[in-house]
Amino acid sequence: MTKDTRRWLELRVRCPIAGDDREVLLADGLIHLGACGVEEQSGWYVSYFDEPNDPSEFVSTSLSVLSNATGLSSIEVEHRWQLHEDWEENWKRGLGPRRVTDTIVVFPSWAPPENLHPRDIGIRLDPGMAFGTAEHGTTRGCLRLLDSVVSVGDRVIDVGSGSGILSIAAARLGAVSVQALEGDRYACEAARENIIANGVGAQVTVTEVWATSKSLIDLGPVEGIVANIEAGILEPLREGFREALVSGGWLILSGILDHEWVKSRERAESNGLTLIVLDQDGEWRSGLFRRMT
């Protein structure tokens, strides 16, 4: 067998301000630079790229793009080479089936779970360019809350759907229709593939669009909305969240850091939403709210 001598460029970047929204922008910037995968390792965001024609220029350009995306000039960047074979094995080695709730198990295609209970919901999802795997605290928080609140027959909107994992979960939990809204073209492509792979293409529709309050209201009324996006992006959508929900409808807000939570909760409550459950996962907060009137 001929050994694969092709190389990946491994780029490691870190924000000087830990626990800030800029970390989300950093990960998003890596994806838009063409990363074949992004994972967090002890505060560093590690990504892999096809070997560029001019590696030095690519690293320099990447630093400039990421600095502009985050508004920081002191981003730390390291790089090294990984053989294709080594990268694939390293990437897969740390990823296997993960039981997120009593019923939801997320797994990559190369490691299907064994001995699933008949009531278990297995979601097949390979790591890739779209945000949203069970490796991130916000995704896990949303999955836990979805598992507790989705009822058979619910109509759901997934705002910033990324990989489609939350849309898939909602459909598998019984939602009759899910509108997945995502402005990133690559994420939409990944989501459509994941949705088909999980057999929920009839229930889930992916639309390439950045959500607005008006677009949410136009899609309503619905029984539930899940929004796993940055706290700053949630703010202008709050009126749309409430108006798109039926009376008694539920809203899951995530992508909120610990120091942002109080303000986010107060703004939601001032808009007529009542906090029902707070989920905490490391520094991340996810809240389940209801429209009571």
Image: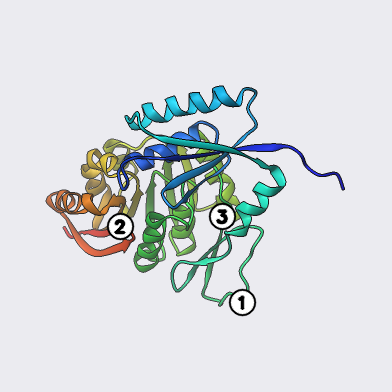
Q: Is residue 20 above or below residue 104?
A: above
Q: Position of residue 200 (x, y in %)?
A: 54, 55
Q: Position of residue 36 (x, y in %)?
A: 58, 40
Instruction: Identify which residue, 85 or 31, lies in the foreground.
Output: 85
Q: Position of residue 173 (x, y in %)?
A: 45, 64
| Residue ID at (33%, 31%) | 72
At mark 3, the secondary structure is loop
Q: Residues within 10 Å of mark 1 (few under 14, many from 20)?
A: few
Quadrant housing residue 52: top right
- Distance of mark 2 from mark 1, alpha carbons? 30 Å
The numbered disc on residue 150 is none
Write down the residue under mark 2.
Answer: 286
The numbered disc on residue 115 is 1
Q: Position of residue 243 (x, y in %)?
A: 23, 46
Instruction: Identify which residue, 70 or 107, lies in the foreground.
Output: 70
Q: Is residue 245 above or below residue 35?
A: below
- Distance of mark 3 from mark 1, alpha carbons? 18 Å
- Distance of mark 2 from mark 3, alpha carbons? 22 Å
At mark 2, the secondary structure is strand
| Residue ID at (44%, 52%) | 42
Quadrant housing residue 10: top right
Q: Is residue 278 above or below residue 27?
A: below
* Amino acid found under the numbered disc labelled 3: Leu
* Amino acid found under the numbered disc labelled 1: Asn
Write down the residue under mark 3.
Answer: 125
Instruction: Identify which residue, 57 or 269, lies in the foreground.
Output: 57
